[in-house]
Image (spheres, helix red, strand yellow):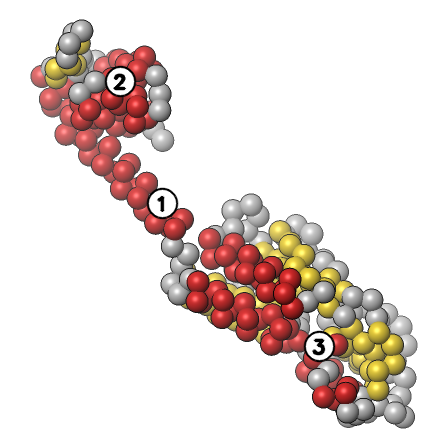
Amino acid sequence: MNKRLYRMAVFALVVEHGSFAGAARVLDRAPSVVSTLVRDLEQDVGACVLHRSTRRLALTDSGEQLLPHCQAVLEALRSSEQIVQRMRDVVQGRLHLSAPTSLLDSLVVPTLRKLLDAHPAIEAECTLSDSRDDLEDGSVDLAVRVGPLTELSHRARRIGSLREVRVDLPGSPDRAIVLPWQDASSGDILRVSSVVLAKAAVLAGLGWAVLPELCLGERASDGTLRARAQRAAVPIYAVHAFGSHAPPQVRATLKILVQVAKSTMA
């Protein structure tokens, strides 16, 4: 804040409370500090604004002329503090969440339910995508990532893990059906953009895929899909590009993501 504006606000506070000590209690400062700030204001304007005595303070002619302007500055500061406090207390505004399709039922829907119940003023938008949306353009506020992180400059919070299983149909060719977060650099490969597409390709007999266990459903239990090997769990992260100053709605969503993942995932 401009130092002169601060001194003007302090002067108005002194007049409002009738003493340096009263203003000092509000500001949590020593009375001598408040007295110095008023003296500095007098140097700024080139005139005395207060008659000081051991019993009381009184406005000078210059002080009376200056006081309405100082009171306006003080009122503006109080209004801004109220606005900031409301912004802290009420989580609101746009929130665009992006997450993989495989986490729809186990993570995304429970998170949105809890988020909107707790913070109905949030304007939520959700995109299901197994590709890694760009966070830099601001269209996505918070993204759930499965697998190793490549965006090391972004803020990331590990929220859980996902067990994966290699599945195929009997007689399928030895072709890897690869999702965006999976690595397969050699051999016969079919690259796909989503878990839904990978599962459909496996069911069509196009090859084998390593899929999240939770998305297999009845296809695995009834023997339609053959589970060949369970893989090590892969990490799940929530990622954003706001650095250390994430908006309240992003922080609130991240907190709920962590709670839901803790209750539903390993």
Q: Which residue is mark 1?
A: 84
Image depth: mark 2 or mark 1 in front: 2
In the rendered image, residue 145, in percent from the top left (x then y), is placed at 66, 64
Q: Which residue is mark 2?
A: 21
Residue 163, disc: none
Cα distance, mark 2 to mark 3?
66 Å
Q: Amino acid at mark 2?
A: Ala
Cα distance, mark 2 to mark 1?
27 Å
Does residue 135 appear anywhere in the picture? no
Which numbered disc flags the more N-terminal residue, 1 or 3? 1
| Residue that lies at the very extreme toward the front in this rendered image | 263
| Residue that lies at the very extreme toward the left in this rendered image | 61
Q: Residue at x 63, y 65 (%)?
A: 263
Q: Residues within 10 Å of mark 2 (few under 14, many from 20)?
A: some
- Give 20 or 133, whichever is nearer the viewer: 20
Residue contact at pointers 2 and 1, CB within 8 angstroms:
no
Q: Amino acid at mark 3?
A: Leu
Q: Residue at x 32, y 46 (%)?
A: 83
Dot 3: element:
helix
Q: Is residue 100 left or right of residue 33?
A: right
Q: Amino acid at mark 1?
A: Val
Q: Which residue is mark 3?
A: 214
Does residue 126 appear anywhere in the picture? yes
Which numbered disc flags the more N-terminal residue, 2 or 3? 2
In the rendered image, residue 221, in percent from the top left (x then y), is placed at 77, 87
Dot 1: element:
helix
Q: Is residue 45 left or right of residue 152?
A: left
